C-alpha cells in the first residue's frame, strides 16, 4: 500500500534539476507589464499632495494609478471589515501603497515608484501595545473574555501566588520565494491568475470583487510556492488585485513580485504580544486559579487577527487542566504592518504564555518544571484497543448530515500497543468521572502526553543530563548550560467551522493512469505527495501512477486556505472520497466481467481481484470505459463533530489534538549573551504517519523555525514606525550552523483516535511549538546565574539574555 | 554591450546593459530560471552558480564581469543522469519547498571542490589542509545558503554522504 511509505516529495527530481517552476519563472509573455507600489513614507497621516509627474516620465513607465483611478476601492482584506483599499490617501502604516506603477520591466517600475513627490499631513502614530491600550485603539470594541470556574477565588484562596509578564516578538515569514502574482487577460473579460498563494479561492473572490466580475470569470492556478508558512494566506491579495486591475485596464499581462525589502515592509508578520498573568497554586505547583491577559498587536487592519487572537486564547491552557481560569484578549490596532497568519496562528503565543507561567511556578517552588507540568497535565486517555479502531463516533455536528469518512481506514496491525501507564501523575486528582474540559468547554479525550513525556525523558536521558548541567553550572566560569522540557497540545481544525471542508477531482484514464486535483496548495509540506499516496492506496496502485496537477479554481471550486495544518486531513479525505466513487463503479464492471459480486472485489498490487481471478488495473479501467461507465469523480469532505461559539468561547472547535514534546539543552556565554543549542530530542505524535520522511522533515523544520522566532529573529521599528529590520542582513533567520548540534527526532507511533485519513494527524504547525523548550532552556541557563527568576523576554537575543541574567542576580 | 558567456556548456552572445547582474542575465535574458532570486542582496544564497568551478552569488555580480567565463547553473549539474549530490538531496530529503535547492546544490558542489583543494575556512584549525568534512566545517562553509524550510538536517546529510565518498 502506498500510504505510510517514506516516498520522496513528488517534485523531488524537478527541484534538484532546477525544473520546478514558481510564478516568477513562468515564461514572459510578450507585452507583459511589471508593477511596483509607491509606498508611503510615514506611519500615520493623510496624503496632501501627490506629484507623480516624474514617475510618469520615468523610462519604461506605461501607466500610473492612484486611489482615484481605480475602478472602486479594490479591497484586499481577508476580513469582513473591508478595511484594506489597494491604494489610499489615508496612511495607516509606513510603507502603505499609495500609488501603483506599471512599466515594461521590474526594475523600471521599482525605480519609477521612488520618484513620487508626496506631502503629508502627519499624525502621531500608535505603535506599541501600551500606546494602543492607552488610546483604546482596538478591534471588536473591547477585550474578549472567557472564563471557567471562579479564577479570582482560586487565586485568593491558593496557598501560594505569583504574577508576572512576558513580552514576545513577532516573526517575519521570510518565505524564500517572495510574494508574486501574474494575471493574463483572456477573451471576454476572463482573467487567469497565477499566484504564489495558500488560498486560491480567496484570490479569485477578491479579484472578482475588485473588478466587479463574477467568481466564474476568474480562474486561479497555483502549482507550488517557495514557502508560505501562513504569509501567503492573505498577503498575496494585494499583488493579484493590482495585476488584475492593470491587466483589465490595459489588456496586457501583468506581473508583480515584491523585492525582498519591500516584502518585509509591506506584508504582515506573526503577531507580537505580551502576556500578563496572576496565578494561585499549591505546594505541588498545581494551578488553582489563573488570570491571564493576552495583549496582541494586530497592526493597521483586521486581516486574520481575530481568529489568530482566538487561537491564542484556545491555547492559553497549553497542556494543563486548569480548574479556574480567566482569559482576557485585547486585539490592538496599531500603525504598523497588519500582522497575519504564521505557522501556529496564535497558538504559539498562547502556549508560550502558559509554559512561562509553569516555569515561573517551578522556580518559585524550587522544583523540577517537568514535575510541575506533569502535576497539571490533563488525564491520560485510555490506551487504544489492541484490535481495530474505536467505533466511529456519532456525528453530532448540528447541521445536515455529513458524507461520512470512507470506512475501513484503519490499519489494525499498526495500532500502538499502548503502555497502559494510565494516569501516572494524576495522583489525588483522579479518578475523574467525566473527561476533563478545556477552558472553552471541549472534552479532552485523546491526551497522550503522560506516555510521550515518560518515553522522551527516558530516551533523552533527562535526569542524568539535568545533574550534569547542574554540575557544569556549579563549576563556575563564564559559561552556563540550560536544560528544559516542554510539551505541545495543538488543536486541529479551522476555528471558523465552515472552512473545514474540501474538494477533489480524480480522473482514471482508459490506460489505467490517474490524474488528481484537489483544493490544497503545495508549499513544500509534501501535501501533494501525501494526497497522491492516499489516492493510489484507494486504487491499490503505486503512487507514481498518480499525476498531481496544479491547484486550479476551475477544477475544484470553493476551497479553503491550505492552513491550520489541515491540508492532508481535508484534501486526503476528499480525494479518497472521489477515488472510492470511481472504485465502486469499476468494481461493478469487474464483478460482472468475472461473474461475482461487486462487494467481493479487491484493489491490490495494481490488480483488481475477485476470488482467485484478477485483471490488471489497466484492463479494469479499459473495461469500465468500454462499458460506458464514468471514470471521473469529484469528492468532498467536511470535518464532523465541530460546533463552536467564538463569542461565548464554548464548544468543540477542534476535531482532535496533536501532541509532542521536546527536551533542549543550550550553552550560554554570560558575558556576551551569545548562545547555542547543543542537543534537542523530540518525540512527536503524527498519528499513523502518511509519510514518515515528510513528517520528520516537517518536525525538524518547524522546530528550527520556532527556535528562530524565540532566539535570533528580532523585528525592530524605530520611533516613527519604520521597520528597521527589512533584509536578511539585519533580520537573522536560522542558518545551517544554528540547528541543534545533536538533533534526535522520533515519531510517536499510534493511531489518531479520531477518524482522520488513515488515522494520521496534521503535522505542519504543532511541532513549531516544540521550540518553546529552547527558550525555556535559555531561561534555565539564566536562572543558574542567581537566585531570582530571570523573566527572560522573547526573542532571547543577547541583549534580552543579559537583562535576564541581571534580573536573576538581583541586580 | 556585448557579453559572451558559456552557460552549461552552451555559448551565448548577449547584448546587455552594463548594469545587468549575472543572475538577471541568466534568468531573464537566457531564460534559465533554475537559479532563484531570494533576496537580490547577496544574503540568502538562492542565486548561487559556479563560475569557472567557483561558487558565487550571481545577484552580486555583474554579467559584464564574466565575459568569456564558464558558468554552471543547477540545470547544468546533470547530463540526463543526476549528479551524486542531486541524488543524495532526494534520498536524504534535502528540501521542502525547493526554492533554496538550486543554490544549495551549486554551493555544495563548489564547496566540496574547495575542501578537496585544501582551502581553509573560518573554523579550520590550520591554514594548510587537508580538511575533513566535519559538522563544524560543513555548517560554516554552507552558512551562506539559507533554507527557510530549515531542511538543514537533510541538506547536511546529503552533502556529507557525497563528501565522505569523495
Ligand atoms: S538572491 Fe543572491 S544571495 Fe539572495
Ligand atoms: S526548501 Fe524551502 S527554503 Fe529550502
Image (cartoon, coloured by chain):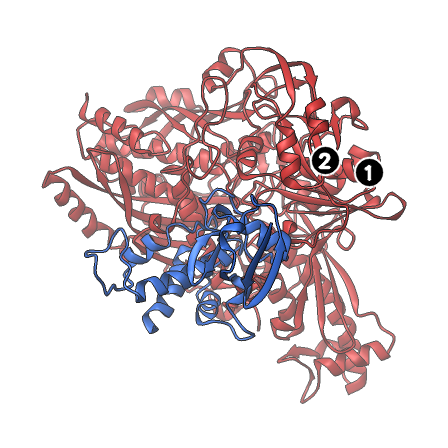
Chain colours: A red, B blue
User: Of helix, strand and loop, which one carries label 2?
Assistant: strand
Decide: marks 2, 1 in contact (CB < 8 A)? yes
Residue extending furthest toward the bottom = A612
User: Of helix, strand and loop, which one carries label 1?
Assistant: helix
Check residue A250 in the rendering and tell me which mark sits there, or answer none.
1
* Discs 2 and 1 lie in a common subunit: yes
Q: Mark 1 and ligand 1: say if the CB distance to the nearest ligand atom is below 8 Å.
A: no
Is A545 above or below relative to A277?
A: below
Say if residue A136 shows up in the picture: yes
Where in the figure is residue A325, as x and y percent of width and height?
44, 27
For the residues labelled 2 and 1, the Cα–Cα distance comes to 10 Å
Residue indicated by mark 2: A102
Where in the figure is residue A807, as x and y percent of width and height?
23, 24
**Earlier along the polypeptide chain: callout 2 or callout 1?**
2
Which of the chains bears the disc numbered 1?
A
* Nearer the observer, A773 or A703: A703
**Quadrant of the rendered structure where residue A63 is?**
top right
Amino acid at each position: 500500500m502506498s500510504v505510510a511509505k517514506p516516498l520522496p516529495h513528488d517534485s523531488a527530481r524537478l527541484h534538484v534539476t532546477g525544473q520546478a517552476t514558481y510564478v516568477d519563472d513562468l515564461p514572459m509573455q510578450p507585452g507583459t507589464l511589471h508593477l511596483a507600489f509607491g509606498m508611503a513614507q510615514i506611519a500615520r497621516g493623510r496624503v496632501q499632495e501627490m506629484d507623480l509627474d516624474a514617475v510618469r516620465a520615468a523610462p519604461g513607465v506605461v501607466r500610473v494609478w492612484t486611489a482615484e483611478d481605480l475602478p472602486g476601492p479594490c479591497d484586499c482584506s481577508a476580513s469582513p471589515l473591508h478595511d484594506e483599499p489597494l491604494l489610499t490617501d489615508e496612511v495607516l502604516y509606513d510603507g502603505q501603497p499609495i500609488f501603483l506603477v506599471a512599466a515594461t520591466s521590474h526594475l523600471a517600475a521599482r525605480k519609477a515608484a521612488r520618484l513620487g513627490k508626496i506631502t503629508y499631513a502627519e499624525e502621531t502614530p500608535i505603535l506599541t501595545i501600551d500606546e494602543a491600550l492607552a488610546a483604546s485603539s482596538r478591534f471588536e470594541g473591547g477585550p474578549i473574555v472567557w472564563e471557567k470556574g471562579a479564577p479570582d477565588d482560586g487565586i485568593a484562596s491558593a496557598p501560594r501566588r505569583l504574577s508576572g509578564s512576558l513580552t514576545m516578538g513577532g516573526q517575519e515569514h521570510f518565505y524564500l520565494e517572495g510574494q508574486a502574482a501574474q494575471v493574463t487577460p483572456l477573451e471576454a473579460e476572463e482573467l487567469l491568475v497565477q499566484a504564489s498563494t495558500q488560498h486560491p479561492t480567496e484570490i479569485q473572490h477578491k479579484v472578482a470583487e475588485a473588478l466587479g466580475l463574477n467568481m466564474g470569470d476568474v480562474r486561479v492556478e497555483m502549482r507550488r510556492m517557495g514557502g508560505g508558512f501562513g504569509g501567503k494566506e492573505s498577503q498575496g491579495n494585494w499583488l493579484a488585485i493590482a495585476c488584475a486591475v492593470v491587466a483589465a485596464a490595459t489588456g496586457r499581462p501583468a506581473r508583480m513580485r515584491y523585492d525582498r525589502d519591500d516584502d518585509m515592509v509591506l506584508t504582515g508578520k506573526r503577531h507580537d504580544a505580551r502576556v500578563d498573568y496572576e496565578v494561585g497554586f499549591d505546594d505541588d505547583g498545581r494551578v488553582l486559579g489563573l488570570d491571564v491577559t493576552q495583549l496582541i498587536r494586530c497592526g493597521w487592519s483586521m486581516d486574520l487577527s481575530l481568529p489568530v487572537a482566538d487561537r491564542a486564547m484556545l491555547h492559553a491552557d497549553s497542556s494543563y487542566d486548569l480548574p479556574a481560569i480567566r482569559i482576557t484578549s485585547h486585539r490592538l490596532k496599531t500603525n504598523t504592518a497588519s500582522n497575519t497568519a504564521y505557522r501556529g496562528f496564535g497558538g504559539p503565543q498562547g502556549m508560550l504564555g502558559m509554559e512561562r507561567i509553569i516555569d515561573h511556578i517551578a522556580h518559585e517552588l524550587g522544583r523540577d518544571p517537568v514535575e510541575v507540568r506533569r502535576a497539571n497535565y490533563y488525564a491520560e486517555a485510555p490506551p487504544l484497543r489492541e484490535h481495530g479502531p474505536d467505533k466511529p463516533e456519532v456525528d453530532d455536528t448540528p447541521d445536515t448530515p455529513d458524507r461520512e469518512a470512507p470506512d475501513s481506514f484503519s490499519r489494525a496491525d499498526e495500532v500502538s500497543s499502548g503502555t497502559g501507564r494510565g494516569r501516572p501523575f494524576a495522583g489525588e486528582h483522579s479518578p475523574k468521572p467525566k473527561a476533563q474540559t478545556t477552558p472553552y468547554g471541549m472534552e479532552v479525550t485523546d491526551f497522550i502526553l503522560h506516555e510521550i513525556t515518560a518515553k522522551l525523558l527516558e530516551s533523552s536521558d533527562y535526569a542524568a543530563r539535568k545533574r550534569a548541567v547542574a554540575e557544569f553550572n556549579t563549576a563556575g566560569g563564564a559559561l552556563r548550560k540550560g536544560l528544559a522540557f516542554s510539551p505541545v497540545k495543538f488543536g486541529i481544525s479551522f476555528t471558523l467551522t465552515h472552512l473545514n471542508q474540501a474538494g477533489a477531482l480524480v480522473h482514471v484514464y482508459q490506460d489505467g493512469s490517474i490524474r488528481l486535483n484537489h483544493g490544497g496548495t503545495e508549499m513544500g509540506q509534501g501535501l501533494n505527495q501525501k494526497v497522491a499516496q492516499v489516492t493510489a492506496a484507494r486504487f491499490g496502485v503505486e503512487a507514481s501512477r498518480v499525476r498531481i496537477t496544479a491547484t486550479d479554481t476551475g477544477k475544484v471550486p470553493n476551497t479553503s486556505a491550505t492552513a491550520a495544518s489541515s491540508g492532508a486531513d481535508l484534501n486526503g479525505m476528499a480525494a479518497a472520497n472521489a477515488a472510492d466513487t470511481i472504485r465502486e463503479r469499476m468494481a461493478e464492471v469487474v464483478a460482472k466481467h468475472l461473474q461475482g459480486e461487486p462487494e467481493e472485489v479487491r484493489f491490490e498490487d495494481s490488480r483488481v481481484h475477485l476470488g482467485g481471478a484478477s485483471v490488471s488495473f489497466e484492463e479494469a479501467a479499459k473495461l469500465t470505459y468500454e462499458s460506458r461507465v464514468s471514470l471521473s469523480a469529484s469528492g468532498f469532505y467536511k470535518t464532523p463533530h465541530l460546533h463552536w461559539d467564538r463569542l461565548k468561547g464554548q464548544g468543540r472547535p477542534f476535531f482532535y489534538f496533536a501532541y509532542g514534546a521536546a527536551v533542549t539543552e543550550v550553552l550560554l556565554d554570560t558575558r556576551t549573551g551569545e548562545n547555542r543549542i547543543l542537543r534537542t530530542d523530540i518525540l512527536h505524535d503524527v498519528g499513523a504517519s502518511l509519510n514518515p520522511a515528510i513528517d520528520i522533515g516537517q518536525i525538524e523544520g518547524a522546530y528550527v523555525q520556532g527556535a528562530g522566532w524565540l532566539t535570533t529573529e528580532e523585528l525592530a521599528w524605530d520611533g516613527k514606525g519604520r521597520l528597521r529590520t527589512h533584509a536578511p542582513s539585519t533580520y537573522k533567520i536560522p542558518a545551517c550552523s544554528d540547528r541543534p548540534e545533536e538533533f534526535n527526532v522520533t515519531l510517536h507511533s499510534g493511531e489518531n483516535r479520531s477518524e482522520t485519513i488513515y488515522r494520521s494527524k496534521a503535522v505542519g504547525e504543532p511541532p513549531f511549538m516544540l521550540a518553546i523548550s529552547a527558550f525555556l532552556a535559555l531561561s534555565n541557563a539564566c536562572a543558574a546565574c542567581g537566585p531570582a527568576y530571570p523573566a527572560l523576554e522573547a526573542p532571547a537575543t543577547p541583549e534580552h539574555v543579559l537583562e535576564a541574567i541581571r534580573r536573576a542576580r538581583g541586580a | 554591450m556585448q557579453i559572451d558567456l558559456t552557460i552549461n556548456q552552451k555559448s551565448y552572445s548577449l547584448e546587455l546593459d552594463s548594469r545587468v547582474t549575472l543572475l538577471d542575465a541568466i534568468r531573464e535574458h537566457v531564460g534559465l530560471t533554475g537559479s532563484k532570486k531570494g533576496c537580490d542582496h547577496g544574503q540568502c544564497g538562492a542565486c548561487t552558480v559556479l563560475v569557472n568551478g567557483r561558487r558565487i552569488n550571481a545577484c552580486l555580480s555583474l554579467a559584464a564581469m564574466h565575459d568569456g567565463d564558464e558558468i554552471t547553473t543547477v540545470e547544468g549539474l546533470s547530463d540526463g543522469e543526476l549528479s551524486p549530490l542531486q541524488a543524495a538531496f532526494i534520498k536524504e530529503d534535502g528540501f521542502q519547498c525547493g526554492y533554496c535547492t538550486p543554490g544549495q546544490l551549486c554551493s555544495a558542489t563548489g564547496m566540496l571542490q574547495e575542501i578537496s583543494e585544501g582551502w581553509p575556512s573560518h573554523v579550520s584549525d590550520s591554514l594548510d589542509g587537508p580538511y575533513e568534512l566535519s559538522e563544524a566545517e560543513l555548517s560554516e562553509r554552507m552558512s551562506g545558503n539559507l533554507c527557510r524550510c530549515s531542511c538543514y538536517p537533510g541538506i547536511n546529510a546529503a552533502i556529507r554522504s557525497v563528501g565522505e565518498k569523495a
